[in-house]
Image (cartoon, rainbow, N blue to C red):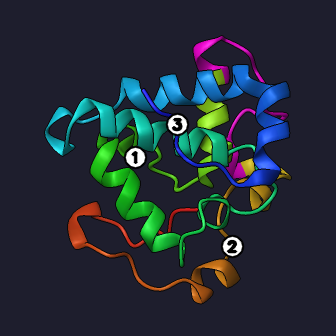
Amino acid sequence: MAQPALRTDFADRMAHRGDEVDDVRGLLLAHADPAAGPAEMAWLVAQAVAVACLGDDHLWQDLQLAHRGELGALLRHWFPSLVALNAGDMKWKKFFYRQLCLQAEILICKSPSCAVCSDHALCFESTEDAAASPPPLSADRGRSAHPH
């Protein structure tokens, strides 16, 4: 299967962190909706998202999307059961890696709950971020959060 086109700055990162890409892609594919489209497309989308997680910007920026709402729509379409697990609207990169740590039974958080953690602003969207984002693209989420 052909690899999706990568930004040139991700090629070096992927050479050194390919195991992370494999893990994130596997997480996404475990939640792929077969009704969303062909399995090959699900794999390509999961690969592109996983590689973009290696970037330094917001995931929607690393994917070269226009805004967070586009990322939310993409993830809801292809991986709805994973999106449903992000009930607190944690930023997507943090959420994916947290899911991987939970699967491996690795505790990475310094607080017993997100509500009392001093890093809350690093993991969840701030009020300023939400104000800068366009509204969600569909009303099917049941909440008005803006994915990262």
Q: Are marks 2 and 1 in contact (CB under 8 Å)?
A: no
- Rendering coords of residue 144 (x, y %): 39, 73
Q: Quadrant of residue 38?
A: top left
- Rendering coords of residue 29 (x, y %): 40, 28
In the rendered image, the quadrant that contains the C terminus is bottom right
Q: Residue at x 26, y 72 (%)?
A: 138
Q: Secondary structure at mark 1?
A: helix
The extreme left residue here reads 35
Q: Which residue is mark 2?
A: 126
Q: Which residues are magenta?
A: 101-115
- Give the crowd class for mark 2: few <14, some 14-19, many >=20 residues within 10 Å: few
Q: Secondary structure at mark 3?
A: helix
Q: Which residue is mark 3?
A: 47
Task: Using the image, tell me which numbered label, if any, was put on residue 83.
Answer: 1
Q: Residue at x 40, y 46 (%)?
A: 83
Query: Residue 4, relative to residue 112: is it above or below?
Result: below
Is residue 111 a member of the stretch shown in magenta?
yes
Q: Residue at x 65, y 67 (%)?
A: 61
- Rendering coords of residue 110 (x, y %): 85, 34
In the rendered image, the quadrant that contains the N terminus is top left
Q: Earlier in the sequence, mark 3 or mark 2?
A: 3
The three-letter code of the residue at mark 1 reads: Val
Q: Earlier in the sequence, mark 3 or mark 1?
A: 3
